Amino acid sequence: MATFEELKVNKSILKALDDLGFEQPTPIQEKAIPVIRSGADVLGIAQTGTGKTAAYLLPIFMKLVKAEGEDPRALVLVPTRELSIQVGADIEELTEYSNIRHAAVFGGIGWTKHAELLEPGIDILVATPGRLFDLYHAGALSLKKIKTLVIDEADRMLDMGFMPQIRRLLEIIPVKRQNLLFSATFNEKVEEMCHEFLDFPERVEIAPSATPAELVQQSFFKVPNFRTKLNLIRYLLEDEERFNRVIIFTRTKENAEAVFKIIKRKTEGEKRILHSNKGQNTRLNAIQAFKDGEVRILITTDVSARGIDVSKVTHVFNFDLPQRYDDYVHRIGRTARANNHGEAIALVDPSEEYHLNKIEEIIRMGIPERFLPEEVELVETGKEERQQQAREIDRQKKLENPDYKGAFHQKKRKPSKKSSVQPRPSGKQKKHKRPGKRR
Ligand code: AMP
């Protein structure tokens, strides 16, 4: 697997990736970045959650190098206000140490505000089609320097009837440019769009995440909080015969550590439990011991689990749901290898139901719910955790509906050092830096 360094990502961007905790490129990034860098037109088929935004943004940053001139050189066309804000926020985070300037614009508020954002000069513009034309016709925006055009969520763009605007846009922007079209799905209409807009496109696609190993029996429990999750896992693990070789996935190292400590303590100091998030050596030893069958339970994060190839894993627990939804598919693919049967069980707290729905969309199937066994002690949710869950639910509601006025006030952002940056919408939290400990 390539690293970001091997993909030749600039130093300043590498630093931002490091801050964000992006340790390795996702599969779509690994595939798309070199192809986009080659200058070819690209059709990328990837859903939200796969890292597709950075897959097109990183090579754009490499091409732009640094701030230059006044007119935007890259244009990202998006169907919705929500996505415009999201992509703008991603650019802001990724260019933390670079002087590349951007603005994210969308309808629904007066265009003059957006015109002001463009005034000092920008390098990347993220825009919904309607707002793009508002600014263009008002003379607030020049598109003469555009060298890269991205059409993101092309399928949605088509569903929303934006085709005429896109055609008009292509008449205005320079003919000599690179086109990148990203779509979550590929159908006849998207294919037509490709024929019309792309020149000999290279197609990049990640293995369809819609096909989790058929032998995996999936289910989920609704669990109110972290401690009840621990009680449930402990209870289930008592059945050693059934839960014979188990991987427990957690989203963060802190959670892995907490689950490890508590489960180890409560399973009569069971020796056959390890977690893979210590140093590299301990990690490899843990994985080897697990492979050899000396260890029954392995606790790991997604990152540490890379490369674990063990057959006969009977159960995969999703102690919490991954933020990148294709990781769910990778996680459950650890069981039911080599024609063995396997079970994948997710523990879902109220703030994770949103992610569960998104995962079900991606795998295109419903995951059956199971009910908590009576023997499992239900612990009341503590104040801090309740608030964390409520905040997260708020954030999700805002993602779905940017007009939603959250129950929580956002801390004031410090003014950006870059003049033309679109402010993050109020209430948006840094996606990547969610608190790890959830007790
Ligand atoms: P996207 O598919 O672009 O909506 O991205 C989904 C999520 O994955 C976002 O929260 C990104 O910030 C995150 N992400 C993108 N690339 C990586 C990476 N290489 N490693 C970890 N997380 C990533």
Image (cartoon, rainbow, N blue to C red):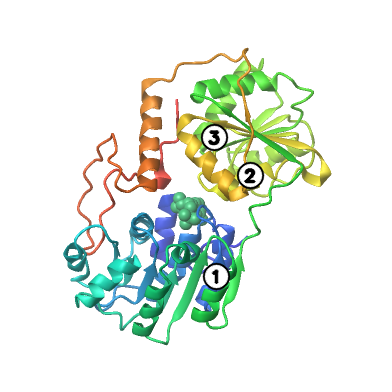
- In the rendered structure, find residue 226 and report the number of the disc placed on it: none
- In the rendered structure, find residue 320 and report the number of the disc placed on it: 3
> Where 201 sits versus 415, above or below?
below
**Residue 155 percent location from the top left of the image:** 50, 64
Dot in front, 2 or 3: 2
> Where 275 sits versus 34, above or below?
above
Tell me how far mark 3 sits from mark 1, CA to CA: 37 Å
Whether residue 184 is visible here, answered yes or no, is yes
Residue hosting label 1 = 189
Q: Amino acid at mark 1?
A: Lys
Residue hosting label 2 = 365
**Residue 1 percent location from the top left of the image:** 63, 60
Tell me how far mark 2 sits from mark 3, CA to CA: 19 Å
Of residues 171 and 269, the one nearer the viewer is: 171
- Of the numbered discs 2 and 1, the one sitting upstream in the chain is 1
**Residue 21 percent location from the top left of the image:** 46, 49
Q: Are the residues at dot 3 and dot 1 in contact (C-beta closer than 8 Å)?
A: no
Of residues 428 and 308, the one nearer the viewer is: 428
Query: Residue 268 vs residue 302: left or right?
Result: right
Number of disc labels:
3
